[in-house]
Amino acid sequence: MNFAALFRAFDAAVALRDASRRLMGAPPPPESGLSTTPSGPASAIVGQIETRLTNVVVAALKEAFDRDHARMELERAQLEDQRRRAEEAMRLEVRRQAMDRELGRLRLIAAAALIGWITSFVLVAVRLSAMTPVARGLTAAGWLLLLGSLGAAFMAQGRVTLTDSSVPVDASTGGAAALWLLIAGLAVSAIALLF
C-alpha cells in the first residue's frame, strides 16, 4: 500500500473542504487543528451537556446523602429501641429480685410461725396435766396468733406474686401483720410457759 498517495489524497480533500467554506462565506478554521474554544452552536451544546451532567452528579450526591441520612436514622432508632429494651429488662430483673427477697422474708415468717406453733403444741402435749387454766388460755391465744401469722404470711405471698409490674413490690399490711402476729404469738407462748 502506498501511504504517500493516501496522504496526498487526504491533503487534497482537506484543501477542497477549505475552498468550499471560503466560497460559502464561513471563516477559515484555525491553523493549529485543535480548537480550545468551541464555536457558537457547539459551545451551547457543550454547555447544556455540562449542565445536565452537573445536575445528574448533584442529584446522585443528594440521593446518596439522603440514603445515608435515612440509614443513620434507622440505626439511631434501632439503638434507641435496644436501649429501651435493655432498660425494661433491667427494671424487670430488679423487680424480680425484690419479689424474691420479699417472698423469702414472708416464707421465713411463715416457717417461724409454723415451728413456733408445733413447739408450743408439743410442750402442751407434754405438760398438759401440769398447766394451769391461765397457761392453757395463754397457750390457746398463742396458737391463734401463730396460726394467724402463718395465714397472713401465706396471703401476703399471694399478693406479692399477683401484683402488676407498675406497683412497687410490697407485702403491704399482710406482711407487717404476719410479722407482728408472729412476735405476739411467740411472746404469749413464752409467757404461757412461765405459768
Image: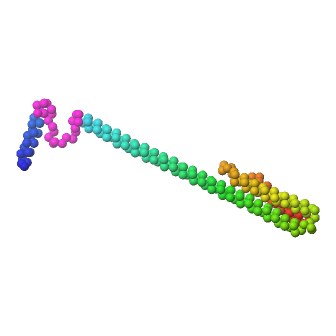
Closest to the observer, 61 or 119: 119
Position of residue 44 measured from the top left corner of the image (x, y, whole percent): 26, 35
Instruction: State the residue at coordinates (43%, 47%).
Output: 68
Q: Residue 35 lies in magenta, yes or no?
A: yes
Instruction: State the residue at coordinates (87%, 67%).
Output: 125
Instruction: State the residue at coordinates (11%, 33%).
Output: 20
Residue 36's place in the image compared with 121, above or below, is above
Q: Residue furthest top?
A: 24
Q: Residue 107 lies in magenta, yes or no?
A: no
Instruction: State the residue at coordinates (89%, 64%).
Output: 192
Q: Residue furthest bottom?
A: 126
Q: Main secondary structure of the magenta part?
A: loop
Position of residue 194 measured from the top left corner of the image (x, y, whole percent): 90, 66
Closest to the observer, 17 or 91: 91
Residue 93's place in the image compared with 42, above or below, is below
| 47 sits to left or right of 97 | left
Closest to the observer, 28 or 58: 58
Q: Quadrant of residue 29?
A: top left
Q: Quadrant of residue 181?
A: bottom right
Looking at the rendering, the stretch of residues picked out in magenta corresponds to 20-42
Residue 54's place in the image compared with 91, above or below, is above
Residue 56 visible in the picture: yes
| 33 sits to left or right of 169 | left
| 15 sits to left or right of 180 | left
| 156 sits to left or right of 64 | right
